[in-house]
């Protein structure tokens, strides 16, 4: 019998994205999977819509927005109680190929040393524009970068490869790995928890593998308003500093500060030129809050910007 996979789809006030994602999951050809819909304290009618259109799907309602990390942890605990062999974290702003689980599980089952696997990810609406073919840690201004980022897919990433991390918008992890390394670290709230997870798995000598035959499409940063929004800049800045405090050595910090300073100067220039001060100011605020590991109040963050 094929290993059991629980797919966790986390939602926060984006019911249309979630409905499209869930419809694509209905087409998956893998024989043994279950979908869990976790609502992260939405104040729209997301839960009602999903319950009405997908009555077979189990739904968990969180009392507030717990963030990506802890919101998914709620689902992971449930999946482990349901004897899942694998857990597939999937952003709700994604569409998956029907063979995605066949490809990911097959690759993972090849070797007991493989702990986490992930697909080739394209930008939504762009047939051949890549978002990620796995990821590398470079400790520069954004600390990490997806391989193939924004490149046209010409077959240059068509080989299975070991990578530093798998992007959390589509990440398959073995049950036994979670049992050894624990859940996602909720200190991040959103961003870098996936990279942290992969590092912890590698520390236990598990391999992190990119599987190109598995494919999906992603509306990048939809939940935080896009890559140029104040919310995205705040959360990325905060999580980057927290990540650096856990894993960065002196040389890493020097690289990070050098490239980050250049980014901030460029942001200030854009502020003067285009009168857009909120993204750079929110990035600086996020860096500050990350240094002091201040907890995120997303409702306040949303209202502030």
Image (cartoon, grey):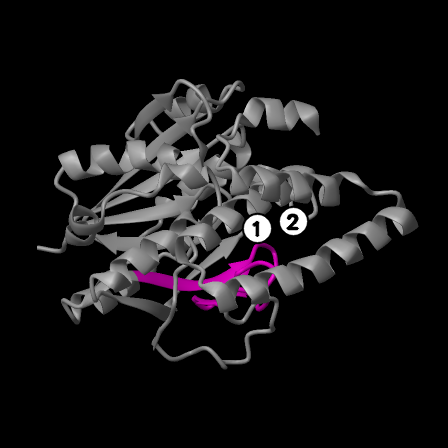
Bin the neighbour count of mark 2 within 10 Å (Cα to Cα): few under 14, some 14-19, many 20 and up: some
Observer-side mark, 2 or 1, equals 2
Q: Where does the image place residue 35, in percent across and percent down from the top left?
A: 29, 39
How crowded is the residue under tag 1: few (<14 C-alpha within 10 Å), some, or many (20+)?
some
Residue at the farthest right position: 273
Please check the rendered image and state whether residue 126 is part of the magenta-colored stretch, yes or no.
Answer: yes
Left or right for 216, reference 14:
left
Q: Which residue lies furthest to the left in this view?
A: 1
Q: Is mark 2 on a helix, strand or loop?
A: loop
Location of the N terminus by quadrant is bottom left
- Residue designated by label 2: 227
Distance Cα–Cα, label 2 vs label 1: 8 Å
In the rendered image, the vertical position of residue 165 relative to residue 37, given as above or below? below
Question: Going 22% across and 34% down the picture, which residue do you hit?
Answer: 77
> Which quarter of the picture shows residue 216?
bottom left
Q: Do the residues labelled 2 and 1 touch (CB within 8 Å)?
A: yes
Q: Pick the residue in front: 174 or 260.
A: 260
Residue 90 in sight here: yes
**Residue for badge 1:** 220
Q: Image quarter for residue 127?
A: bottom right
């Amino acid at each position: 019998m094929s290993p059991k996979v629980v797919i966790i789809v986390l939602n926060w006030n984006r019911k249309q994205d979630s409905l499209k994602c869930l419809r694509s999951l209905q087409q998956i050809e893998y024989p043994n999977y279950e979908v869990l819909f976790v609502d992260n304290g939405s104040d729209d009618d997301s839960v009602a819509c999903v319950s009405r259109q997908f009555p077979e799907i189990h739904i968990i309602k969180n009392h507030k927005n717990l963030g990506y990390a802890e919101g998914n942890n709620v689902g992971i605990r449930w999946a482990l109680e349901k004897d899942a062999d694998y857990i597939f974290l999937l952003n709700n702003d994604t569409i998956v190929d029907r063979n995605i689980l066949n490809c990911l599980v097959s690759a993972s089952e090849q070797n007991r040393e493989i702990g986490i696997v992930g697909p080739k990810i394209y930008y939504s609406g762009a047939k051949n524009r890549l978002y990620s073919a796995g990821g590398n840690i470079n400790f520069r201004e954004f600390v990490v970068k997806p391989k193939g980022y924004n490149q046209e897919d010409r077959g240059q990433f068509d080989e299975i490869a070991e990578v530093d991390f798998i992007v959390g918008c589509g990440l398959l992890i073995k049950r036994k790995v979670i049992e050894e390394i624990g859940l996602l670290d909720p200190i991040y709230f959103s961003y870098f928890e996936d990279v942290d997870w992969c590092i912890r798995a590698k520390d236990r000598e598990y391999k992190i593998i990119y599987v190109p035959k598995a494919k999906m499409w992603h509306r990048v940063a939809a939940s935080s308003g896009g890559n140029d929004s104040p919310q995205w800049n705040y959360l990325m800045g905060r999580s980057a500093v927290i990540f650096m405090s856990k894993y960065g050595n002196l040389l890493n910090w020097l690289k990070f500060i050098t490239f980050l300073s250049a980014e901030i100067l460029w942001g200030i220039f854009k502020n003067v030129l285009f009168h857009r001060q909120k993204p750079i100011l929110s990035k600086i605020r996020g860096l500050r809050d990350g240094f002091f590991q201040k907890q995120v109040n997303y409702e306040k963050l949303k209202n502030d910007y």
